[in-house]
Structure formats: structure tokens, C-alpha cells
Amino acid sequence: VIASSDYGIRKPNRLLFEAGIARSGLKPEEIWYVGDKLKVDVDGSRACGMVPVLYKSEYNCYGDIPEGLLTVEDYRQLTELFC
């Protein structure tokens, strides 16, 4: 877990995602990044090679969700995606 405040930058800044990748010791394509915002979370993680998963929060409005994007409406659904 990293916090943007530790780095003085905010998502979707690529450096923040790259810091998380480096700290994990994994390849970007091995990381599933779950977030509730298309521009900040999905676009930022995808740009760094991670697998983005959109958590469709009841508090956000979503226009056009890209075709093929993994989505969940409940975090328990993540286990279904892994199996």
C-alpha cells in the first residue's frame, strides 16, 4: 500500500503507479488495480500496464464504460474474476 501524500503526487500521475509497481516486486501485467474512477484509476493503471478493474460505486456516475473493462459492483465479486 502506498499513499499519494508520501510522494507528493496524485493519480493519475504515472509516477505514483510506477512506485506501486516497483514496491510490489511484480510485473505490471500481474497487478490488478481496483478503483472507482475511470479517468484516475482505470486510465492511470492501464497506462502503466496493470489490469484495471472498475468498482462501480453508487456515489459516482459513469458514462461510457470501455468495452471489455472488468467491472464489479461489490468487492466480493473480485473472487469470481480470479477463478
Image (cartoon, rainbow, N blue to C red):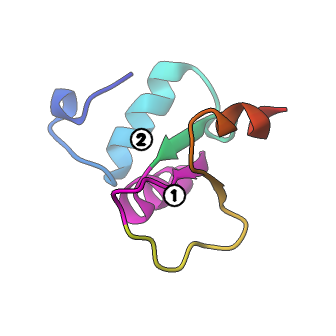
Q: Quadrant of residue 61?
A: bottom left
Q: At 39% from the left edge and 21% from the top edge, which residue is drawn?
A: 1
Q: At 57% from the left edge and 49% from the top edge, which residue is drawn?
A: 73
Q: At 23% from the left edge and 47% from the top edge, which residue is drawn?
A: 10
In the picture of the structure, the residue carrying the numbered disc 2 is: 17
In the picture of the structure, the residue carrying the numbered disc 1 is: 47
Mark before the other along the chain sequence, 2 or 1: 2
Q: Is residue 22 left or right of residue 79?
A: left
Q: CA distance from mark 2 to mark 1?
A: 9 Å
Q: What range is drawn magenta here?
A: 36-60
Q: Is residue 17 left or right of residue 21?
A: left
Q: Indicate the secondary structure of the residue bearing disc 2.
A: helix
Q: Position of residue 48 (x, y in %)?
A: 52, 50
Q: Position of residue 59 (x, y in %)?
A: 33, 57
Q: Position of residue 72 (x, y in %)?
A: 61, 49
* Residue sitting farthest toward the front: 58
The answer to whether the residue labelled 2 contacts the one labelled 1, judged by CB atoms less than 8 Å apart, is yes
Q: Residues within 10 Å of mark 2 (few under 14, many from 20)?
A: many
Q: Nearer the viewer, residue 32 or 9?
A: 32
On the rendered image, what quadrant is the C terminus found in?
top right
Q: Nearer the viewer, residue 14 or 10?
A: 10
Asked whether residue 53 is drawn in magenta, I would say yes
Q: At 34% from the left edge and 40% from the top edge, which residue is drawn?
A: 16
